[in-house]
Image: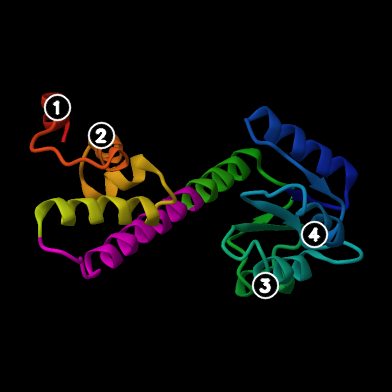
Amino acid sequence: MVVDDEAAALATMAELLREHGYRVETAVDGNKALEKLDSFAPDVVLTDLDMPGMDGLDLVRNLKAGRMRDNPVVVMSAFPTSEAAVQALEQGAARYLHKPINTGELLLVLGQEVERLRLQKEAEQLRERLTERETFETIRIPGSALYDIERYAILKSLEATGGSTSKAADMLGISVRKIQYKIHEYQAGRKTASEPEESRKSS
């Protein structure tokens, strides 16, 4: 999302970013930007600091206190020694760009921030998966027969992953095919002494 009260600058930046593959929404001040968050969820917000109404500094504060607290906000100002720019960085803004904006620098900064956000999300997903696995490994398994333990492990994994066979297989370190075979076996209410040869190979 690009936020700037200067219509020409706003249109130029939006067109530039669209040409480089970004999906862009624009707003003329902080209030309009916040209103659009209900229908548009940007990865990065690029905002001017010096605007009427809600200025860029107040926008940064609102974003970092709400749903955009983990997303990068890049601020812009025509004043290189702007106190507001320093305050914006202290409030959680990721980067500061000086106007007039250098196109190469803008694209570099946005690319870096989008990549950083992607890596951050991947790290969070990995932590969640590890937490799920640690929680599963500490569960007390009833019964002592191998069949009972295996059945319990598979069904609890499916429960923990919302019924996703691929996630359950990943959690247990076995193949999706084996999970599917076992589900069929449990639904049929029968125990087998062996599995299909292909299932054993894929696990």
Along the line of sight, the residue nearer the viewer: 24 or 84: 24
State the CA–CA distance, disc 4 to disc 3: 12 Å
State the CA–CA distance, disc 2 to disc 1: 9 Å
Q: Is residue 82 visible?
A: no
Mark number displayed over residue 65: 3
- Under circle 1, the secondary element is loop
Q: If you read the primary sequence from the N terminus, does the residue marked by circle 1 or circle 4 appear first?
A: 4
Q: Magenta span has 135? A: yes
CB under 8 Å between callouts 2 and 1?
yes
- Under circle 3, the secondary element is helix
**Can you tell which quarter of the image residue 77 is in?**
bottom right
Mark number displayed over residue 181: 2
Q: If you read the primary sequence from the N terminus, does the residue marked by circle 4 or circle 3 appear first?
A: 4
Q: Which residues are magenta?
A: 117-144
Amino acid type at circle 3 is Ala
Point 13% across, 38% down: residue = 192
Point 17% across, 57% down: residue = 149
Taken as a whole, is the magenta stretch helix, strand or loop?
A: helix
State the CA–CA distance, disc 2 to disc 4: 50 Å
- Reading the image, the residue beneath label 4 is 34
Q: If you read the primary sequence from the N terminus, does the residue marked by circle 2 or circle 3 appear first?
A: 3
The C terminus, quarter of image: top left
